[in-house]
Image: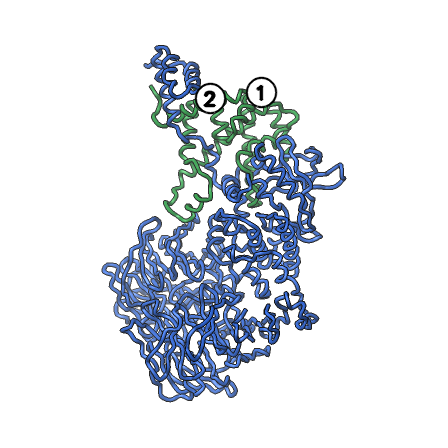
Chain colours: A green, B blue
Amino acid sequence: MKGTNAGAVTLLLHAWGRGDVQARDDLFDLVHRDLRARAAAYLRRERRDHTLQPTALIHETYLRLVDQDRVDWQNRAQFLAIAAKMMRRVLVDHARRRNAVKRPAHTLRVALDDQVGRVEPVACEVLAVHAALDELEHIDERQARIVELRYFAGMSEDEIAGAIGVSRSSVTRDWQMARAWLFRRLTIGTVD
Amino acid sequence: MSVEPDWARVKTVFQSALDQPDDLRASFVADACAGDGPLRAEVESLLIAHDAAGAFASADALGSLTTASLYELSATDVSLVPGARVGSYDIVGLVGSGSMGQIFRAHDPRLGRAVALKVLSPDLVPDPASRARFDREAKTIASLNHPHICTIFDVGHSGRFEYLVMEYLEGETLTDILQRGPLSLDATRRYATEMIDALDTAHRSGIVHRDLKPANVIITDGGAKLLDFGIAKLIAGDGSVSATTDAIYSTRQGSVIGTAGYMSPEQARGQGVDKRADIWAFGCVLFEMLSGRPVFARDTVSDTLVVVLEREPEWGLLPATTPQSLVRLLRRCLQKDPARRLRDIGDARFDIEDLDGGAAERQAVARPSRLARAPWWVLGAGVIGLAAMVTVIQSRSDVVPPPPLRLSVVPPEGTTWAPFDISGAPQFALSPDAKQIALVVADTTRVPRLWVRALDSTNGRTLTGTDHASGPFWSPDGAAIAFFADRKLKRILIQSGAVQDLAEAAQNTAGGSWSPDGTILFGGPGSGLLRVSADGGPVTPATTVNTQGGELSHAWPQFLPDGRRFLLYVRNRDRAASGTYVRSIDSQDQRLVLASSVRAVYAPTGHLLFERAGSLMVQVFQDTAAALTGQAMALPDHVVALSGPSWLPVSVGAGTIAYWNGDGRPTFDLDVVDRSGRAIQHVLPPGQYLGLDLSPDGARALLTERLDSQNDALSTIDLKTGLRERVTLVPGIAHFGVWAPDSKQVIYSSLEGGVPRLYRKIVPGNSPEVRVVPSERQPNMFPTDWSTDGRWVLYSAPGPMAWDVFALRIGDSIAHPVVHSPQNQIQARLSPNARWIAYASDESGRFEVYVQSFDDASGKTLVSTRGGSQPTWRGDGRELFYVAADGAMMAVPVTSESRFEHGSELTLFHTRSQQVLAPFAPSYAVSADGKKFLIRSELTMGAYRTITVVANVPPDRGVR
């Protein structure tokens, strides 16, 4: 399973590193397909006690798909960017689906889930951030990347710093500003 | 067009401003922008947004994932490849994935042995602050050395991997094995003993497993091995309990499903956890080994937790052959209150060991040294015509002879217990000398008859001439049995088989008692007790119901030894005044002995037996003073008790008690099936579903589910999404409801604190329950139908003689009797054109389905041909369904609606249910188009409802 994909992913990463945009898109599809196939296989097995936290998923996907000896940190950063985009897509799809399903106001099940489950950002926050982030991308590409990695891929600021090759403090500063910008965009609209 | 400030400059000023102390920030921005108005406006606006953003986007979006999407996303497998080296171990291959990470087979080149490497998921890797604790606890766990605990050799970290090095085991997990079905008793005993040893050793070292479940038990050639001892705590932070459960709840949604079913109630509540949590989990695993099914696990975490916290295990799922000592052990392990739970796992050994029975062991009964701790022996098993199990209990006291004798009695082959009797009369009776037992059993034609067997024999015989028998009781000399049948009190002489009618009796058995001087007291057609000579003759009233004092009925007489005084159950409108009273044939005075909603039973040993919270209690009863003294003690087994009035399935003879034990309630599948009975949809996992209805639009089910002996709950279930919503939120019982024709509201009954109520409520939602008051005088009301035009609700309620059908006009809440006669009429349904009413009545001696005019009761037609109940109309009124006495689902075409005419009936399919003859609790509902049936089918036929007979009860101490 690993062999063929690992080789392909590594090649695509190198191609993308040389500026081949098509390689990036192919990579995206490959990773996404791989993930879906595994999800399906998983669901067939129905092993309920088998799970990983989503934050670990990108690392795991990376480790699974690339030939570690032949990929340098730059490729890794590229890969993480891809993975973060992929997570963003998954989460946005998920949020849209959830928004579509109207949940009854009060049920025992919901009450219990709320008690048991983690604190959830409302689905519409995910969709709002997704839309506003598209705009931010045009203003500050790096900030948009950082939001993607942090918000959609759940990476820590240290991990992001390592992944995109900047200092931790500049990741923090960029995140603060991007967050302020997004918040303003989503609450009072653009300042024209 | 406004001037767009330069983003790079905005960024510089904004980010530098954040570095300033708050009070200097404004002046800093003013200075830095140096007269650049747009720049300053932009920076200030962003700073305001920054301050106002609060928690916006601070949690990552991954939190929005539900468990289901987590599954999809977490489908990641291999992260380490064969040949890779982790620490000093060479990876051989992936073995499996657990909730905490992946498990690899690896090779330890230094010792030349295979090891298992458990690589923790990255999110479980301890942060530097808790590293010391992690290593320390890992060492403690590694110090555990026991043949039935998977040994941890080493803990290591290599790069980003955290891993545990463990003994490599070849075998299957208990989960895998149990997927193929339950274990044999022998295997269960062996593995349970090994698990007890392992847990005992660990507990003595102060280590609690915290996550014991079948997935953590590997069955190897060398027996059971427990995995992951203490790992739950190891990875959970500072080791505090709430951290454990939080970690389980918040980051491991997937695994919590696998874990929640074994989680003790205190863990589920996030309270303190000690070794008793392991004892609970051990009980869960033991139950599952015996039954092959998880005791508490449901499809979702929330459902599972509800079951863990609120419900009793379904004891009926245990095989009938399960030794009583194991059942007792399970009960002690699965006590929801940890304070009442088995304290020390080591104590469980004595309940597990020495069951090997067999002839050799019979001798051992006399071996005092063994008897001191071993509580019981199996003496014998299945016998011809009667599956019975005999066990001898050695009481823990020093009193040796005679040991109490315990038998389980089930109906002879080819018969079943008689169908549920509306009156709730116990369908068995011990003879006064406790040498014989009479059972009411039904053969394949479902006709109930008496069957008598001597307790010391394995054979019994059916008594002819006792068709439709119910509520038997013995003559004091054991030569005759009185019983109720066809609305008569009858008597049969056992030797000659001669049957004699003694008197007219109530439709619903209200019990009887036979005094030494040949007087019989019994429940008559009225509400008071009657008196007749055991040889027949005139019938005279024995008691008069004091209606002024709120009394509703007198029932269940029991003579005391003097043959003059007797106990009786009095139902009073005031619940506190309902209970068991003592009075005398010579007087109208009576005195309350015990207030209760269920009758008490007098034992000639000088005890009173009664039900309390599902347990059968024994308390000393002084005959002369007719008063209870001393402490009430609970029998070890739960007794079956409907929370209905006057019902306790207990019979007592000399020093011997017989009772229905276990949870006693059948478990049902809930399915949607088509007209051929083929399942289209499995609606819910098996449960104790008491009643159901399908909304006319077919989208939702209304379901009554029993939670425990004191509670049931009404819920709606969306058949498409499976979403379930409680309709009744307050505790109560007898919540049976029907849908309104608009599918938007329901009407339902409720008994709260013994007071019957009817409510209607809009569902789903939080709208308030609206009380519907047809009549305060009715002791029970069970809605059976809400007419298509919305104007009428039909319900069953006790009439003057038996159950009758009433119609409640929704407009003015006035109730009208619709079908009333001395017989039972139940389960009424109005045809869609509101002209015809279909119902079940036992006027012919068995229940049949009839149709008559709703307005004037004219045109009565018998529809069923071989017994029937639960009629239901198709939405267009062109078809009538019912369940035949043999359980077949029948369809009758309705050919004319103006005058009710019907064609010949069709058998659609066989339901897997006993005939439902209760005035409530329908077992099916049909969609408006007549194509889909929502049906509950009984899963545990026969496995529940065994009679336990405990003989040689120590007269002074009740039963231990």
Tell me residue B176's x, y (percent). Answer: 62, 51
Tell me residue A85's x, y (percent). Answer: 50, 28
Hey, which quadrant is residue B378 in on the image?
A: bottom right
Question: SS for tag 1?
Answer: helix
> Which chain is home to disc 1?
A
Please indicate whether residue B736 sits to the left or right of residue B686 in the image.
left
Please indicate whether residue B413 sits to the left or right of residue A111 in the image.
right
The residue furthest left is B812
The residue furthest top is B34
Q: Which residue is mark 1?
A: A17
**In the image shown, does B12 or B954 lie closer to the viewer?**
B954
Say what amino acid the circle numbered 2 marks: Asp
Tell me residue A124's x, y (percent). Answer: 40, 34
* Residue at x 58% of width, y 75% of height: B385
Quadrant in the picture for the C terminus of chain B: bottom right
Whether B765 is drawn above or below A151: the answer is below
Say what amino acid the circle numbered 1 marks: Gly
**In the image shown, does B190 or B745 lie closer to the viewer?**
B190
Q: CA gap, disc 2 to disc 1?
A: 24 Å
**In the image shown, does B165 or B538 lie closer to the viewer?**
B165
Q: Residues within 10 Å of mark 1 (few under 14, many from 20)?
A: some
The answer to which of marks 2 and 1 sits earlier in the sequence is: 1
Q: Which residue is mark 2?
A: A174
Tell me residue B17's x, y (percent). Answer: 41, 18
Q: Is residue B484 visible?
A: no
Q: Is residue B814 visible?
A: yes
